[in-house]
Amino acid sequence: MKLHKIVLSAFCLSATVLTAQTPADYVNPFIGTSNYGATHPGAIAPRGMLSISPFNVAFDTKGIKDPLEKDSRWLSNPYVNENRFLTGFTHVNLSGVGCPELGVIITMPTTGELKTNHLDYGTTYSNEKASAGYYSTHLTKYNVKAEMTASTRAGVSRYHFPKGEANILLNLGLGLTNEQGAMVKIVSPTEVEGMRMVGSFCYNSPELAYPVYFVAKLSKPAMNYGVWHKPETYKGVEAEWMWYNGDVRLKEGFSREVVGDSIGAYFRYKFDKEEIVEVKVGISYVSIANARENLEKEIGVKTFADVYQQTKNEWNKQLHARVEGGTDDQKTIFYTGLYHASIHPNVLNDVNGDYPQSKTNKIGKSNNRYTVFSLWDTYRNYHQLMTLLYPEQQLGMIKSMLDIYDESGWLPKWELNSTETFTMVGDPASIVLADTYLRGLTNFDVEKAFQAMLKGANTLEKNPIRPGVAEYWKLGYLSVDGGVAGPVSTTQEYNIADFAIAQLAKKIGKKSDYERFNKQAYSYRKLFDSQTKLLRPKYSNGKWYEPFNPASGANFEKNVGYIEGNAWQYVYMVTHDVKGMIKMMGGERAFEKQLDHIFDSKQYDMANEPDIAYPYLYNYVRGSEWKTQKRVHDLIEEYFQNKPAGLPGNEDTGVMSAWLIYGMMGFYPVSPAEPIYTFTAPKFNKIILSLDKKYYPNGELIIESNASPENLYIKRILIDGKPYKSYFITHEELKKAKNIRFELDRKPLNTKK
């Protein structure tokens, strides 16, 4: 009997182990693929240079109202969940960005007659599945199952063909990017190589377009292969002689380079039974040789299953927070948030260390070069999360930013593949550099970083980082007539950067710099209108701009004073000076009343960055801290859900996910370049953060609570068993803590006197 019980117990334990879900199992890559979240469900490794995504944004729009199609609207993603017509699988993509780019090197399995026009060979699809590092679907027209997985710089697609004629297409003319131009060369019946031009992100700097190189290898030799080329249609007398004018040219068996805009390669088969063909693709931003080496070193002879398991293991290592309690949906949105936050910035260097330098047209060497720095977004909360959970990756990003400074002469602003796009406003790199150092990650050249900050702040002419900076130093603000877009919000951005520079200067002993920049950091106050209690656009002569409509600018409406927002969404974007704003407002209650109005009148925009910290500002008002807990809870419930439309809007390269992750953990970095956090109620009963002992000696932070659907409000906070009286905690205090316990209640705690 005892033996029977032991065997039965062992069986139950084994079954539990086999069915236990890992963090990667909770990830739902479909979250954010609707509601303009701009994510994609494709296969990708952590920080992957390559990703394989379904491409369903190119189709015939005739008769379709408001089509979500790449050439019919501003669309920045290769996949939209609502669409149902698929034209292939892209191998370089961006996730959660606001402008169309990349989405190229598109492969497509078909059957039957060879067709090269995507509108002809495209198909509906069904039975989509996606997880961390994996995607699959069934192509209706062809009865083909397509699966894909990826390593960092290479990927594998597996196509399950039925009996009969089959084709594998490589379309280099189609893409999400607005750039054109490609080269293709068939090396053998199982290999093709080439390049595709990309660039001009947000329609900036088209002269800086650049190539992405590739090598693709097929697991079975093709019966026939070739290249297609569709040249432009000629007009005039010459066209009368060209009987082939505008026709697609099929170059069967051609094995030399073909260059053009609308080109591609095809591999044809005739199967006498069901067959699987794998396509392995390596990419590089340096050369075809490097793309081949990336493919050989990362995948080589590994099977599809081998690559997927390796990538899944990497995802489980990356998603190293463990949560207990909460619902499965809460776990899914939490781990998917960590997943989305681990896509960009991504690796740029090849396995041999090569990468394209910024602006020099030279090839650099680094084993840790990152790219995709959407810094106007990410300085607010994302890099603080990286500093806490992934300090080595954050330091790699910091060193990449300093390398960009060495190569180009300026810190990055919105950098993509070593190309500066100068998208958005402000001087956000300075904030990230300072914040990282002030949170204890000091293993980088801080003197170089500080000099780079000073250059961006003090160069009065031809300054691509801070346009209008001469007027800013002279008046303390940017004027309506000064020629700089969004003068109010850009003044605020410069102020936050100056605050960051001041804090770093103070830390490293540069007293005069500290005093100068700290004084300038509050110059936004010159734009405060005591009548409207808002920050208003002003002329250089000191007069207010009229007419003034504080609601103008919402939903990306162009307006005189603000970038991607309105007066309500910017008035409290002064987290470095909340106490100063409270004083200008006439006290805590007036400050709170206006904050209530912003939320209650639906002026708060969860889908964008300027007011992203607003829910946490109630913690500055004694007795109203419960409103932070209620606002954060309600926003998570409304905007973050386990469904394709489960993000409030654009993911912004991990910023929305970082906001969610912090909100579910119970603390938030409310003021960039000020190493503090402020509390809210966590959403899990237990959160175990595995921390790098090199930077966090305890190696672990445990957050516990009695969280439930009813227990939304903080009753008491204990740190390492001792009552903690504040709603704020410094990074150093958090670093020393081993356990933070939240005692929650159904009713808010009112501490007003």
Image (spheres, rainbow, N blue to C red):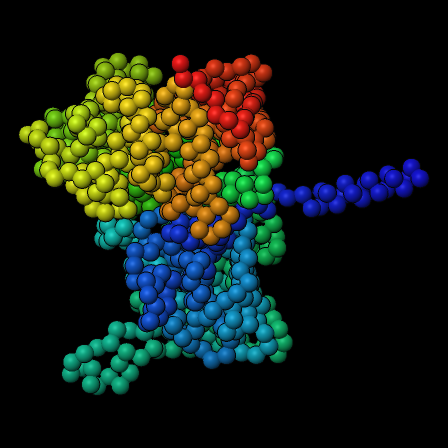
| Number of marks in picture | 0
Relative to 654, is 362 on the left or the right?
left
Could one spot residue 646 in this view of the protein?
yes
Q: Quadrant of residue 184?
A: bottom left
Residue 164, given in percent of the width and then of the height, sits at: 57, 79
Residue shown at 55% from the left, 63% from the top: 127
Residue 492, given in percent of the width and then of the height, sits at: 24, 30
Residue 319, given in percent of the width and then of the height, sits at: 54, 39
Q: As drawn, which residue projects farthest toward the left? A: 541
Q: Is residue 321 above or below residue 69?
A: above
Relative to 11, is 338 on the left or the right?
left
Observer-nearest residue: 29 or 448? Answer: 29
Residue 529, given in percent of the width and then of the height, sits at: 17, 27
Q: Is residue 279 above or below residue 207?
A: below
Q: Quadrant of residue 635?
A: top left
Q: As drawn, which residue projects farthest toward the right? A: 1
Q: Quadrant of residue 60?
A: bottom left
Could one spot residue 658 in this view of the protein?
no
Q: Quadrant of the N terminus?
A: top right
Observer-nearest residue: 595 or 101? Answer: 595
Residue shown at 45% from the left, 20% from the top: 750
Observer-nearest residue: 180 or 258? Answer: 180
Residue shown at 47% from the left, 80% from the top: 113
Q: Quadrant of the C terminus?
A: top left
Residue shown at 21% from the left, 86% from the top: 241
